[in-house]
Amino acid sequence: MIHFLFPRDSADPHRPDEIFADQWAALTEAGFSASLCSDATLAGTKPLRDVPAGCRVVYRGWTLKREEYESLVRVIEQCGATAFTQTKEYLLTHHLPNWYPLIPDLTPETRVYPVEADLVAELQGLGWGAYFIKDYVKSLKTARGAIVREPSEVTSLIAEMREYRGEIEGGICVRRFEEFVPASEKRYFVLRGVASAAEGLTVPNVVKLCAERIHSDFFSVDVARRQDGAVRVVEVGDGQVSDLVGWSATAFAKMWLRATG
């Protein structure tokens, strides 16, 4: 049995956070059970409630660091249940250095460096012309953006990442910049090896290849069309903490029904 776990609303502990309310409604209307968790639960200081023993628990919520996800798995197991995605699988798709080696031909070329590396010298050595900078999980979302065209700019960009995000998660990933067609990026989900698209879309071949090569039961794949027409993987992420970009909650629930019916 599949059970869904959502963050509770801080203003009303009996309801899911407003951002996830439509998913809660669609999944429970589809016949799935669901319950709520607090920040204290995710921190491992408060037990879960209303999680049926013997079920597999799918978390639908905010991005979690490694230690936070490990804590979540523990509190799920304390209920006699099992996490749908184990920590190793979570990190496989959540951290870029884990999934990139599985699909290097489908996505922009990438190098990974420790935070303390001399990134100016490293970028000069690469000589790519333009570089997309992120940590293991996210890129800079301010107006400045995450693209560096002169290696000397990377130092201030990393400083802004620290200021904006509070910390660098894992290390620094440098991706060769590729020019994508504006508004061409789409999100797909892979559930139990089957790739699915939002309404009105078909699953591109690169997503099917991801489904074959990446061994996680639930993850997302973001795809965009390059200016030369090539379809490229922009990002892979754990499905539990991936937003429904371009998806309706109803389509999301139907995907789960197909996979578990």
Image (tube, rainbow, N blue to C red):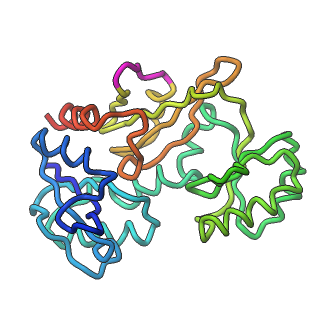
Q: Horizontally, is 30 left or right of 139 in the view?
A: left
Q: Horizontally, is 236 left or right of 240 in the view?
A: right
How many numbered marks are there? 0
Q: Is residue 144 above or below residue 207?
A: below
Magenta stretch: includes residue 204? yes
Q: Horizontally, is 177 left or right of 40 in the view?
A: right
* Residue at position x 26%, y 45% in the image: 23
Magenta stretch: includes residue 217? no
Query: Which quadrant of the view contains residue 49?
Result: bottom left
Quadrant occupied by the C terminus: top left
The rendered magenta stretch, by its main secondary structure, is classed as loop
Q: Horizontally, is 56 left or right of 175 in the view?
A: left
Q: Is residue 144 above or below residue 104?
A: below
For the record, the magenta segment spans 199-205
> Where in the figure is residue 78, as x and y percent of width and height?
19, 73
* Residue at position x 70%, y 39% in the image: 109
* Residue at position x 28%, y 36% in the image: 252
Q: Is residue 248 above or below residue 175?
A: above
Farthest bottom residue in view: 45
> Where in the figure is residue 212, as x and y percent of width and height?
42, 33
* Residue at position x 17%, y 53% in the image: 3
